[in-house]
Image (spheres, coloured by chain):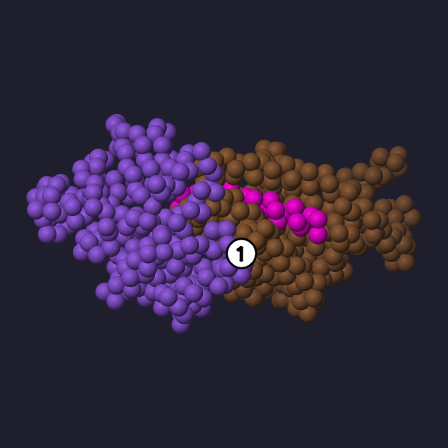
Amino acid sequence: MFKLWATIVKDIRVLKRDRVGLAMMFGMPVLLVLIVTSIQNNTFQLINKTKIPILICNRDTGKISAEFIQAVDKTDMFKLELVSKDQGEKQITDRMRNKDMLLSLIIAADFSAKIDTNAVRVTGKALTAFGLEGDTLGPKTGNEGLVTLYYQPILQESIRQTIQGALYGALQLVASKQVLRKLYFSINEKPLSTKLENELLDNNMTIKDIPVSLDKSMKRPNASQHNVPAWTIFAMFFVVISLGGSIVREKLSGSFIRLKTLPTNYFISLLSKQLTYLLVTMLQAALIFAIGVWVFPSIGLPPLNLPADMLGLVFVTLICGWCAVSYAICIGVFARTQEQANGFGAVSIVILAAIGGLMVPSFAMPDTFRTAMKFSPLHWCLEAYYGLFLDGGKMKDVLVNVIPLFAITLFLQGLTFLGLKTKKLI
Amino acid sequence: MDPLAVNIQHLSFGYPDQPSPFFADFNLEIAKGERFGLFGPNGSGKTTLINLMTGLLSFKDGSIKLLENEIKKHDRSINKFFGVIPQDLSFYQELSPKENLEFFGAWSGMQKQQIKTRSTELFEILGLADVRNKTVQKLSGGMKRRVNLAIAVMHDPEILFLDEPTVGVDVQTRLAIIDYLKELNKKGTTLIYTSHQLSEAEALCSKIALIDEGKIIAHDDLEVLLVEHGQDGLEGLFMNLTGKNEGGNNV
């Protein structure tokens, strides 16, 4: 036992003096979690909280285009800036190129006329279908180019789709309003009153969205709940740079020859490294979670809500840490040079993180990758953490993810043992 | 009769990439308490032989006994009988001499109090007391060699293998190391030494073996061999017997 203790003390001393390794293990993940959460939170805010500035050039003089602008404003997504109808496309796009504006909307000169013509046609068709006498069906007007949206290419596809959806909704509303008015007039031969129009169209329908969680809480997951667990796992597995490198360094240095000539099995050294670095992974998790809970709110990020089952959190963190350490030791035992350990270790972690769903959500992956992700230990770590952080689950709920993780860890330990035997290190 | 420190019988060993064995039916006996020198030109097999005796290389045929313990039959427990000073510096450069001795002492099977007492003693004897808490990286080459020696003798081994223990050090440090090794030998430690520093070898060794291409070509007391071959120094004897200089080139 004293040998093991002395080895742990030695490993901690060596680690304490490895400033680059410490920066990689603690500084880098803290920075990553701060940056990624801020970016994702800002994207969320951009769509949901902040109003996106939009330049509107209304070349139409009719009433319907004014109603359309009003409908766009009512979406609460945009901060409108109206410009003179005389402004050319070049002037507008130039402003956008100067990064003045993310979006511009040009309403065509015949917007109201086309919407109206279309409403007359649809009304006639409807009355005929109802068995009533309708006006003669006019020719179908092309609705293309009623509005033109210019956007900055830097806008992400998902944000652009959301914006288009909102604008399309506003367009549909004014078109439907016009059809309703025409229909009412054709039947009653008097205009539709504003009061009735509002009653018919503004029915205040809403979608109630409820996160399906195991603890039945209605808490909405935020960017912190998604990012903190994911980047904590990434940080834990990144110990491969320090630990894998340290094993190779020890193997290649003179100290290893000395170790082999002493009456102690090298297995003690590996056991010590497992315990030391398991402590490191626990400290990493504690640090990143603490930042999520206490630092995030002070810098305007949503706070991290820790799971109710703290024992479950410690248990999952221990298993994730053990798996990360086992992976690093395995790399260290098989690598012949420090460059091999660092290069392969870092790249493999990025790949395992990508296929494990840390970078792209697993549901968005093609089928092939969804099969491959089952072999990534990072995937099982993430699922277990999400079970606690997002689903409000308890330890028993995440066992289904912990068991495969445990199996992968045992496999890595077995592979390491085989490597040590083959290389005559134990 | 005292047991032999090292008893090698019918040893056969070859590297996987070599067609014929490097050592074939090799025999060597080293008595307890001797200051034994192992010499030969480059590539003659000195380091290979030390690696076989210390278990760094494994062999199938023949036997090597250290203090009557067959090394093939024992696990690492036999390693407590000997200490090794490899040619390369063999410790953690990022730790201090004190921290290195604490760790290697524990791995040698010593207890905490023993480590403390022995470390203090060795720091005084080897002139490391003032630098005991400095990171080894920051020490001079000579100081590093002393740390290398201190770790090897930490657990007071009965046999000490020395492979070029003074390479790259100044005269003062070399003399200090040689004096200390002689002191150890007086207390009963068997020294098995190899070096290219023939003058140093003459000062230290009482008995020598010259090996070339995996075979012993001379094995006796140094003085007897010098008289027998009409030489006044190890260098002349070496060239007389091998026909080669230390670099392994024919003379």
Tell me which chain the residue with mark 1 is part of. Answer: B
Q: Which residues are magenta?
A: A314-342
- B172 or A360: nearer the viewer: B172
> Picture coordinates of residue A248 (x, y %)?
43, 48
Residue at 39 percent across and 41 percent down: it is B67
**Which amino acid type is shown beneath numbered disc 1?**
Gln
The answer to whether residue A336 is magenta is yes
Residue at 68 percent across and 56 percent down: it is A223
Which secondary structure type mostly characterizes the magenta part of the structure?
Answer: helix
- A410 or A292: nearer the viewer: A410
Colour assignment, chain A: brown
Q: Is residue B167 left or right of residue A215?
A: left
Q: Is residue B118 visible?
A: yes
Colour assignment, chain B: purple
- B247 or B65: nearer the viewer: B65
For this orientation, the residue located farthest to the front is: B1
